[in-house]
Image: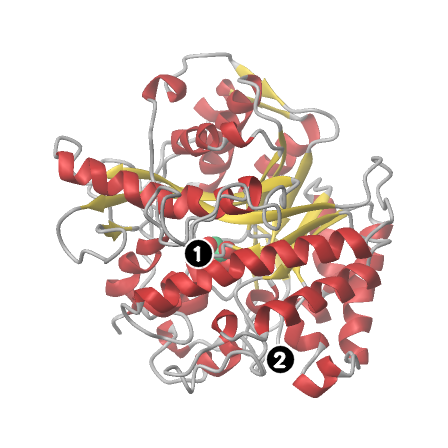
Amino acid sequence: MTIRKTFPVIFAAAALASCSSDDAVKDDGPSEVTFPEDFMWGSATAAFQVEKGLGNTDWGIWVKTPGKILNGDDPDVGGPDALANIDADVAVLKAANQNTYRFSIDWARVYPTRDAFDSDQPDADALAAYDKLFAALRAAAIRPLVTMQHFTLPDWLSDPRAPEEPQGWERPETVPAFEKWCQRVAARWAGEVDWWVTINEPLVAPLAGYVQGSFPPGLVLKIDRALEVGRQEVLGHAKCYDAIKAADTIDADGDGKASWVGIVQHQRAVEPELPDEPADVAAAERVRYLNNLWFINAVVRGDWDDDFDGNLDGPKDRKADPALANRSDYLGINYYSALTASARGLVLPVIDASIRLDRLDTDRPKTDFQWDIYPEGLRVILEEVRPYNLPIIITENGIADSADRNRARYVLEHLFQLGLAREAGLDIRGYMYWSLLDNFEWAHGYCPRFGLHTVDRATAARTARPSTAVYANAAKTNKVTRAEIDALPPYGDPTYCE
Ligand code: FCB
């Protein structure tokens, strides 16, 4: 199975890392950090990772392709089956003192065919299932944070069986269809939802799908197609933003604003593989720009860097395009780790750098996924987005830790950094742990265990891991202290997942 080996390259392109101003992160600072009463404490999932029966998506086709998923795992077998376990999920959210739940609504579940979509005949069972989830959340006073697209696309827009043909975002019909999808979802659930995400991690999917080959359509080193996907997602995001704004005019939570619409980016603290090597430092800068800044520049400032070269001098580049600018009311930030960039190795065109996402040559502790544990990096990437001057939600942060030996420390250390960032003036509104449940981790199947809760493979019963109580306590007290962190055991060796 080669998935493990190639994985570093994937996000490769997705990577990032940083202008790490060590001064900003080495802060002996306070003995505790606090969070406001209305802080959004939550956890996150995505439809394909926790639901069943999404065979009519590109991912549904992909997982049936031999050799693509670690151990041949199948999302329809032994997973959380979330839509059949809504009450259980809402109960464990509530028990963990969470006031927010981030999840996605799956486009192909609601519109299984192109005909159904074109004639606007949504699937009745799908609507009923999501209605039930919203009702249960409302009854428990848990705020939904809803993602319109989390990696999967309907098979009538994206089919990995024909990878040489344009797929998904490459097809001209996808952006207008996505605009409609956003409009309809926002109109239907306007009274339930105020917080929306358009697209989850828009650069991860093309890098994994067209550069690294571990996501559909499974292509390798097709950089030009990957970049075109990124461009189309900017356009799709802007259209979706406008559609939601027009369709959702109901202030569901009474905060005076009917909708908050944001992009979710996968940010990494980008570091040169060899810090004393100027070519690696320059490579890290290019990767950081592409992964962490390029998309945000487009949808916040309207700065369209068509050729991804870091300036707006190209023939198709545009500055402050009003059709793109100011399309993110907040920034959703997924933060897990660092990555390293180098001028040597498998150098990708355009960014002229090679990238490593896991098994980094550092002395930091590692997760079961072989990602570095680097809480201070959270401040690095948060400082990086300060200039955009927008509210921020940590829409994902979490650890693969099947033994649950490192999760409590991981969460509290990241929350501590988050608290320091708030005290340094960043407008951070919430934190979503990834994930509420053990789930189907894309190419790695069920192997990595990110959940606050285990899921029994036979009965789907949810059981809180011990670390959940630690997170629940932070949510309850709106506080994390250094003493609490110091009382936890030091990081132990991971159980590598492969
Ligand atoms: C993020 C994805 C999420 C999950 C975590 C571990 O990049 O958004 O679906 O796979 O990584």
Viewer can see residue 437:
no
Amino acid type of the residue tagged 2 in the rendering: Gly
| Circle 1 SS class | loop
Give how far across and how far down residue 289 sits, in percent.
Answer: 36, 42
List the residue tagged with mark 1: 203
Residue at x-position 37% and y-position 35%: 374
Label whose residue precedes the other's in the sequence (1 or 2):
2
The image's colour scheme reads secondary structure
The part of the image, by quadrant, that contains residue 337 is: top left
Residue at x-position 33% and y-position 48%: 371
The part of the image, by quadrant, that contains residue 271 is: top left
Say left or right for 222 vs 167.
Answer: left
Give how far across and how far down residue 302 sits, in percent.
Answer: 54, 44
Say left or right for 106 vs 37.
Answer: left
Neighbours of disc 2 within 10 Å: few (<14), some (14-19), many (20+): few
Query: Observer-nearest residue: 151 or 64?
Result: 151
Q: Is residue 165 above or below residue 42?
A: below
Quadrant holding the C terminus:
bottom left
Residue at x-position 62% and y-position 80%: 53
Q: Is residue 44 above or below residue 211?
A: above
Q: Nearer the viewer, mark 1 or mark 2?
A: 1
Viewer can see residue 212:
yes
State the residue lying farthest toward the front. 315
List the residue tagged with mark 2: 53
Say which mark, if any, is on residue 465.
none
Q: How far apart are the two marked residues, 1 and 2, measured between alpha carbons?
A: 26 Å
Amino acid type of the residue tagged 1 in the rendering: Leu
